[in-house]
Image (spheres, rainbow, N blue to C red):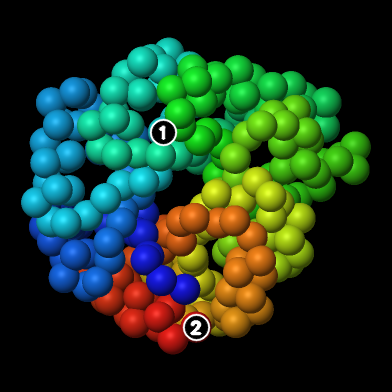
Amino acid sequence: MSDFSYQLYSSRKFPPILATLKMLADAGYTQVEGFGGLFPDAAATADFAAALKANGLTMPTTHLGLDMVESDPEGVIALAKACGVKAVFVPHLAADLRPRDGASWEAFGRRLAAAGAPLKAAGLAFGWHNHDFEFRALDDGSLPIEELLDGGKDLAVELDLAWIEVAGQDPVAWIRHFADRLVAVHVKDIAPKGECTDEDGWADVGHGTMDWPAINAALAKTGVKYLVMEHDNPSDDRRFATRSIAAANTF
């Protein structure tokens, strides 16, 4: 693995963002992945784009909420142009909004594809980022991730590999399954059972239980472009960033 990106959500509890960007550049990252909270208005976006440039970083991917994509596609396109974004991923759906059956997940996939149509017309890739719930079977036996991506047949995929593992599924099998649609992955690790409880059971990459040699071998056979480090709740983001990139460069 090389040319790692870093999901800035990992550092949301450690402001300011300007210090985070410098820390990441010093640690050897060349890319970051944004999230919606960083871009409350056009002025904030312009300041962020300038900070990226000042630190020699690019932001080829970002997470943005479906509400933003649906309500202001032109604003999303402007954000992408300002920050050099190539791919936008919707990252989550609140529990009370999630479909309860396969047909409804398929319809949600169609809704996503329709929302992303203006972005795709502007030359951006657009798709979905998973958690664990998309990989857990529904009462009707269907799997949300498959129904969603059947409904949105042209959606790109960003697989969060550790969440797949949390759901009891095999990340390598799903990398292979979505090989032709895979644009990005979240490089995330899971601590051994009972460890890192103050960090919600997540680990620095390469210091947990994920089978990175097997994952890396599977990724090498796909068209994946972006490898994004993430930790959902690090107690020290500098430690996470530096230990993870050092370990991942040995895979």
The residue that disc 1 covers is: 64
Q: Residue 251 — which label?
A: 2
Q: Which of disc 1 and disc 2 is earlier in sequence?
A: 1
Q: Which dot marks residue 5?
A: none
Which image quarter: residue 87?
Answer: top left
- Residue 201 relative to residue 182: left or right: left
The vertical placement of 57 against 103, above or below, is: below
Q: Position of residue 12 (x, y in %)?
A: 27, 51
- Mark 2 neighbour density, 10 Å: few (under 14) some (14–19) many (20 or more): some
Task: Count every numbered label the image shows and give the total.
Answer: 2
Q: Residue furthest bottom?
A: 250
Relative to 207, say whether 104 is above or below.
above
- The residue lying at 41 percent from left, 33 percent from top is 64
* Amino acid at the residue labelled 2: Phe
Q: Secondary structure at mark 1?
A: loop
Q: Where residue 217 appears, x then y in whole percent?
A: 63, 76
- Characterize the local packing of mark 1: few (<14), some (14-19) or many (20 or more) Cα atoms within 10 angstroms: many
Front in this rendered view, residue 68 or 177 = 177
Q: Position of residue 212 (x, y in %)?
A: 57, 78
Q: Is residue 47 left or right of residue 63?
A: left
Determine the residue positioned at 37% across, 76% down. 244
Tell me the element at label 2. Answer: loop
